[in-house]
Image (cartoon, grey):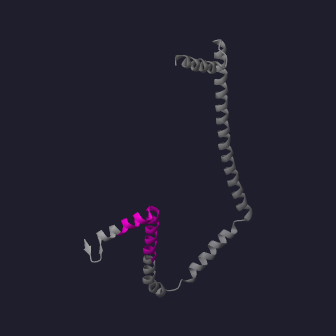
């Protein structure tokens, strides 16, 4: 499609040239800025069209302001003590949840330690039953190394 100077091919070449010249991050920032500018222009156009209509609306009657005052009085009726008590209860619940989570971590690490100790003790007992000392694997490696040298 050809729209005079702005053709689809021209737009694609422009985008590709910017990408090759400046990189992908620059392209993302550029597109975000373009979208932001278009959005702000759209909001400004909507506001400019609606301001005359908003000016012609009648003023708000007194009943709605009285309702607002009444709702503000509702919030004032809540005492600071009750509000503080609710906040402290929420913090207590949060602290208990954190404590439970941390104790779960400690129990898990303790179980891992117990398992590791059990495996190590089991291995040592098996070595003793088979009349093998703890340096069995080190001695076996030395024997293997020395046998390799003899073969060469």
Range of residues picked out in magenta: 14-40
Name the residue located 63 percent from the left edge and 74 percent from the top edge. Answer: 70
Q: Is residue 89 left or right of residue 145?
A: right
Image quarter of the N terminus: bottom left
Up/down of 2 relative to 129, above or below: below
Name the residue located 63 percent from the left edge and 21 percent from the top edge. Answer: 138
Front position in the image: 114 or 107: 114
Residue 25, how many percent across, how many down? 46, 62
Q: Is residue 41 left or right of residue 135?
A: left
Residue 95, how many percent across, how many down? 69, 49
Outermost residue on the left side: it is: 1
Front position in the image: 147 or 30: 147
Q: Quadrant of residue 44?
A: bottom left
Residue 99, how many percent across, how many down? 69, 45
Q: Is residue 58 left or right of residue 69?
A: left
Outermost residue on the front side: it is: 152
Q: Is residue 108 left or right of residue 150?
A: right
Up/down of 22 relative to 110, above or below: below
Q: Quadrant of residue 133?
A: top right
Name the residue located 64 percent from the left edge and 16 percent from the top edge. Answer: 127
Front position in the image: 85 or 99: 99
Front position in the image: 150 or 63: 150
Name the residue located 46 percent from the left edge and 87 percent from the top edge. Answer: 56
């Amino acid at each position: 499609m050809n729209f005079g100077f702005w053709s689809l091919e021209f737009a694609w070449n422009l985008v590709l040239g910017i990408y090759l010249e400046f990189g992908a991050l620059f392209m993302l920032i550029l597109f975000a800025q373009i979208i932001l500018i278009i959005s702000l222009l759209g909001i400004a156009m909507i506001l400019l069209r609606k301001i005359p209509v908003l000016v012609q609306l009648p003023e708000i009657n007194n009943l709605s302001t009285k309702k607002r005052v009444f709702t503000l009085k509702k919030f004032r009726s809540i005492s600071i003590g009750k509000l503080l008590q609710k906040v402290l209860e929420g913090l207590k619940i949060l602290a208990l949840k954190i404590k439970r989570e941390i104790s779960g971590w400690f129990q898990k690490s303790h179980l891992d330690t117990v398992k590791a100790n059990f495996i190590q003790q089991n291995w040592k007992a098996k070595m003793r039953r088979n009349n093998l000392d703890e340096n069995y694997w080190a001695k076996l490696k030395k024997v293997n190394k020395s046998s390799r040298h003899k073969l060469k």
